[in-house]
């Protein structure tokens, strides 16, 4: 009987290997780039959709900090399609501040309020570390809010102006007020822009309330012209000049 030859079985075809998955490129630092343009309400709503924990106020607040006006005016600007400074990456500005996070030097007072007029911005520091900040409105003219070293002299939660009236002819309301010198107070006010007061330091209501609760009578306050002049003013706070001239003639002993 003839022997039947069987063909050798063919080896299975190798399985096609999936191409290797490339790791995503490393994420760079957040971009602080800003573009001046019109931002629409639809864009704001899309940002809210991507970040369910946020509201439109979150992004209006960021725009307010960059454009130096209360978020209520930002909402009006968006409706009127006015150009604004808009961040390329909103996330990069969630914790952004133009003020230093820590103060230079080492002899920090327990509490210190810093107002920088050319930004203008207010920050409050606990042992040299920034614990709160706010966009700020100072005097319409440069000298109306005087630079210098001061302290909180009085606190008044429900203060009314003795000098200026509101649009209804009644004394202007100045809630959450801290008196710094003379008739100049830090208080909640209508921050329509960076230079809009008669000399007082106005903060949006939420920020003014936080500062009012945090500050105490006697808390030192620095009002400085620029960030570059802050070091000079801090040195005056830490090492105040002598009140009387010191003579350096020969010793009489």
Image (tube, rainbow, N blue to C red):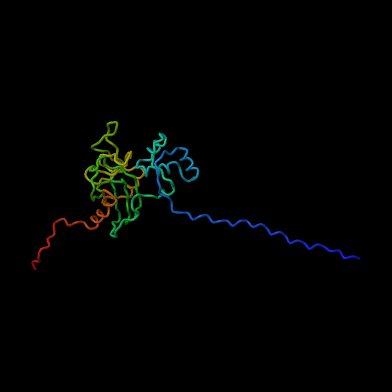
Q: Which quadrant of the figure has residue 109?
A: bottom left
Identity of the residue furthest to the top in this view: 168
Number of on-image labels: 0
Left or right of 150 on screen, residue 30? right
Residue 169, horizontal then vertical, whole percent: 27, 31
Identity of the residue furthest to the right in this view: 1
Q: Is residue 93 above or below residue 81?
A: below
Residue 99, horizontal then vertical, whole percent: 33, 51
Q: Which residue does the image show at 43% across and 39% down from the upper left?
A: 39
Q: Which residue does the image show at 30% across and 57% down from the upper left?
A: 104
Q: Nearer the viewer, residue 59 or 39?
A: 39
In which quadrant will I find the N terminus? bottom right
Residue 172, horizontal then vertical, whole percent: 28, 36
Q: Is residue 207 above or below residue 17?
A: above
Q: Nearer the viewer, residue 23 or 99?
A: 23
Q: Nearer the viewer, residue 116 or 221?
A: 116
In which quadrant will I find the C terminus? bottom left
Identity of the residue furthest to the left in this view: 252
Q: Which residue does the image show at 26% across and 43% down from the upper left?
A: 185
Residue 74, horizontal then vertical, whole percent: 39, 39
Q: Is residue 105 above or below residue 164?
A: below
Q: Nearer the viewer, residue 93 or 5?
A: 5
Left or right of 127 on screen, residue 78? right
């Amino acid at each position: 009987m003839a022997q039947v030859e069987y063909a050798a079985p063919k080896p299975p075809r190798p399985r096609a290997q999936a191409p290797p998955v490339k790791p995503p490129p490393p994420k760079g630092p957040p971009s602080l780039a800003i573009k001046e343009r019109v931002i629409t309400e639809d864009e704001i709503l899309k940002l809210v959709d991507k970040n369910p924990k946020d509201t439109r106020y979150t992004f209006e607040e960021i725009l307010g900090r960059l454009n130096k006006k209360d978020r209520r005016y930002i909402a009006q600007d968006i409706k009127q399609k006015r150009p604004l400074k808009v961040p390329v990456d909103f996330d990069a500005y969630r914790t952004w501040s133009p003020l230093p996070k820590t103060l230079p030097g080492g002899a920090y007072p327990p509490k210190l309020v810093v107002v920088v007029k050319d930004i203008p911005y207010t920050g409050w520091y606990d042992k040299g570390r920034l614990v709160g900040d706010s966009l700020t409105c100072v005097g319409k003219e440069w000298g109306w809010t005087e630079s210098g070293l001061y302290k909180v002299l009085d606190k008044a939660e429900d203060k009314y102006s003795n000098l200026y009236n509101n649009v209804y002819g009644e004394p202007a309301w100045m809630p959450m007020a801290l008196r710094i010198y003379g008739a100049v107070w830090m208080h909640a006010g209508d921050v329509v822009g960076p230079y809009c007061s008669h000399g007082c330091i106005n903060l949006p209501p939420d920020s003014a309330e936080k500062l009012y609760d945090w500050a105490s009578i006697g808390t030192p306050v620095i009002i400085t012209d620029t960030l570059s002049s802050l070091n000079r003013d801090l040195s005056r706070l830490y090492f105040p000049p002598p009140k009387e001239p010191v003579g350096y003639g020969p010793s009489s002993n």
